[in-house]
């Protein structure tokens, strides 16, 4: 038995620059100045440690509390090798406490950390455990929102292209901003539009109709609320490729989206939808419905590594979303928005080796649970 001896929960907040005005990414909240990450470190009796990440951002304090008070204590003394069983024995009794949100985010972090441990125990990278062929990946640049400032949009799209990116995603919500991006680069460069659920179905259909011939690569989450899969399917019928999935959590939610024919691209988020195990289930389901997978990955911690390993495990090239921001410090070797590709190398597990000297000034809280 490889016993879980310690569960540590660490919350870190890194200030960042975006290369333009910061307006509207989170419309009713303060300007977004700092990117939070909740890391979970699980130590085992054989001397190994595994790293996971729970979805953070403004939900970080809630998720942190669930990990410290409910999930963490339930793991102590258990065998770290039984990944599916460890998750199941927490998820089932807690099913009435939220099928999305902090409970599922916390479980996602635990699953990721247990896979990291599995890789380290086996002496191989997680992408190889999952059957991957190469650890070399292409990324796509995921730009912050510049509040519709068309000069800032064009400038940053060009900056991303100069850094080697050929797929670039905006978080703008206006047609002039969409077209400023489209016109800033060549037609063969892919421009994606992530609008984060602002519109009614009829508003979204009108926009989709307006941009139908502009050659955008996809339109992401055009409809409020995100779980209106029938509405999303109606927008999709206009002919613009639709992406969504970062706000879906359980396998059955993904199934409902596929059944509704709501998406061309599915975007599961590893820190929300059940970690590496959850992502594997969704990959298989997407294959059965012939839907393309482009994982969501708007974070910089162990969840970034986990998404990279999952992308590298797939037979077809799978782009790794990378927030196109300048963090105040470089958190670890793998996260570098100025590079458009990366190599996971043969480091065992997830290869998450944080630069704690650099991160230590930005730790908000740290709690250790042990026997
Ligand atoms: Mg998105």
Image (cartoon, rainbow, N blue to C red):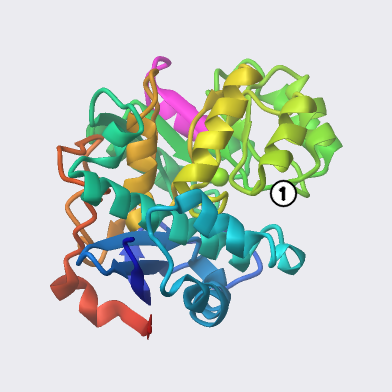
Q: Classify the position of the C terminus by image quarter.
A: bottom left
Looking at mark 1, is its residue's CB closer than 8 Å to ligand 1? no
Q: Given the current orientation, which residue lies at the most extreme front position?
A: 1
Using residue 170 as the reference point, say whether residue 155 is left or right of it. left
Q: Examine the image and state in which quarter residue 281 appears.
A: top right
- Residue 50 appears in view: yes
* Point 36% across, 50% down: residue: 115
Using residue 238 as the reference point, say whether residue 330 is left or right of it. left
- Residue 336 appears in view: no
Q: What range is drawn magenta here?
A: 178-192
Q: Secondary structure at mark 1?
A: loop
Q: Classify the position of the N terminus by image quarter.
A: bottom left
Looking at the picture, tell me which residue is in the foreground, 123 or 321.
123
Say which residue label 1 marks.
Answer: 198
Looking at the picture, tell me which residue is in the foreground, 288 or 101.
288
- Spot occupied by residue 229 in the image (x, y as percentages of width and height): 79, 36
């Amino acid at each position: 038995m490889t016993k879980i001896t310690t569960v540590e929960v660490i919350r870190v907040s890194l200030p960042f620059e975006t290369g333009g005005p910061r307006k509207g990414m989170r419309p009713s909240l303060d300007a977004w100045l700092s990117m939070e990450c909740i890391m979970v470190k699980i130590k085992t009796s054989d001397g190994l440690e595994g790293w996971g990440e729970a979805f953070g951002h403004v939900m970080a304090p809630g998720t942190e509390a669930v990990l410290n008070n409910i999930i963490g204590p339930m793991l102590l003394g258990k065998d770290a090798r039984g990944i599916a069983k460890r998750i199941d024995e927490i998820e089932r009794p807690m099913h009435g406490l939220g099928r999305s949100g902090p409970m599922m985010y916390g479980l996602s972090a635990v699953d990721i950390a247990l896979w990291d441990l599995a890789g380290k125990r086996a002496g191989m990278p997680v992408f190889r455990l999952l059957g991957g062929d190469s650890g070399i990946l292409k990324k796509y640049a995921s730009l912050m929102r510049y509040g519709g400032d068309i000069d800032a949009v064009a400038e940053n799209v060009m900056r991303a292209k100069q850094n080697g990116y050929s797929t670039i995603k905006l978080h703008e919500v206006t047609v002039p901003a969409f077209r400023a991006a489209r016109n800033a680069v060549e037609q063969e460069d892919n421009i994606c539009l992530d609008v984060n659920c602002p519109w009614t179905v009829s508003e979204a259909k009108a926009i989709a109709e307006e941009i139908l011939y502009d050659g955008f690569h996809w339109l992401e989450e055009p409809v409020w609320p995100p779980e209106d899969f029938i509405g999303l399917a109606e927008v999709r019928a206009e002919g613009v490729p639709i992406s969504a999935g970062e706000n879906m959590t359980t396998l059955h939610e993904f199934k409902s989206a596929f059944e509704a024919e709501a998406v061309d691209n599915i975007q599961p988020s590893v820190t929300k939808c059940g970690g590496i195990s959850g992502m594997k289930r969704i990959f298989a389901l997407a294959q059965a419905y012939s839907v393309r997978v482009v994982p969501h990955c708007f974070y910089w911690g162990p969840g970034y590594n986990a998404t990279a390993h999952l992308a590298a495990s797939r037979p077809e090239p799978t782009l790794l979303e990378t927030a196109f921001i300048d963090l105040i410090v470089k958190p670890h070797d793998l996260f570098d928005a100025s590079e458009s590709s990366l190599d996971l190398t043969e480091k065992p597990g997830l290869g998450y080796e944080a630069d704690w000297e650099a991160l230590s000034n930005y730790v908000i809280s740290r709690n250790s649970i042990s026997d």
